[in-house]
Image: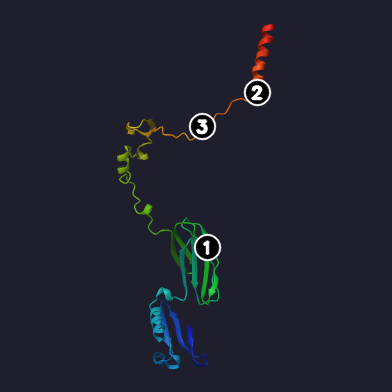
Amino acid sequence: GGNTLMTGIQEQPILLLDRIGKGRVAQMMSDHIWLWARGFDGGGPQGELLRRLAHWLMREPDLEEESLHARVRAGKLTVERRTLKDSVGHVQVTAPSGASQEMELKSAAPGLWRGEVAATEIGLYRLAEGSLSALVASGELNPLELSDLRATEDILKPVTERTGGSVRWLADGIPDLRRVDPGRDQAGRGWVGLVAHKAYVVTGLKDVPLLSGLLLAVLALGTLMAAWWREGR
């Protein structure tokens, strides 16, 4: 049983890997790995092979043969699925808002499948495919507006003190709004003021006649004739 990763003469297995329950087993079917270190027949990467083999036995995530990874870059969510199988299922993608969709992965290399979808929401995306799952964050990990979510007036208080305003809590009731002149109090008991600065700029002036000259002459003549006719009666 197990998976054969390397073969030798006449396709005889050299490196076997297997999973037993929650444990792992690796067996090297040759005692000649020292020949690689001596450069026999060109040598080989014996150090890297043994290092990765030991790390796989210790369950290093990057060396899992069945894995699901994701990353977000430039507004795109890229999902990668590594497997020894010939095919993979659809990946269930759940957005931060709870909206869910299925992503189809396409073969990108032997043992590697990849898919991409737009990441339009900020927050945590959840991915699942079979027994595998992954999480990936979209957007800034520590945005300034989320650094302190406490409801406090301490942040706005220095600004309101300089401008003569005030901070009101809606839980205490909605204050009345009043127009106040510059230099007057801008807040009081149960009310807040909006300063009437009366600041405006005239950018142009144009005279437009209400009636044209001809129409005005016709109306004036008509009025005179109506008055003459009425006077004649």
Q: Estimate the x, y position of residue 38 in percent, counting from the top left.
A: 39, 92
- Residue closer to the observer: 100 or 142: 142
Residue extending farthest top: 233
Residue corresponding to mark 3? 205
Under circle 2, the secondary element is helix
Q: CA distance from mark 3 to mark 2?
A: 25 Å
Q: Estimate the x, y position of residue 110 in percent, counting from the top left.
A: 53, 77
- Could you tell me how many numbered marks the image carries? 3
Determine whether 190 is above or below 80 in the image: above
Under circle 3, the secondary element is loop
Determine whether 209 is above or below 165 in the image: above
Q: Estimate the x, y position of residue 161 in percent, counting from the top left.
A: 30, 40
Identify the residue shown where x is 30% and y is 40%: 162
Determine whether 94 is above or below 45 in the image: above
The answer to whether one can see residue 108 in this image is yes
Q: Amino acid at mark 3?
A: Leu
Judge left or right: residue 181 versus residue 116. Answer: left
Residue corresponding to mark 2? 215
Sequence order check, earlier mark of 3 and 2? 3
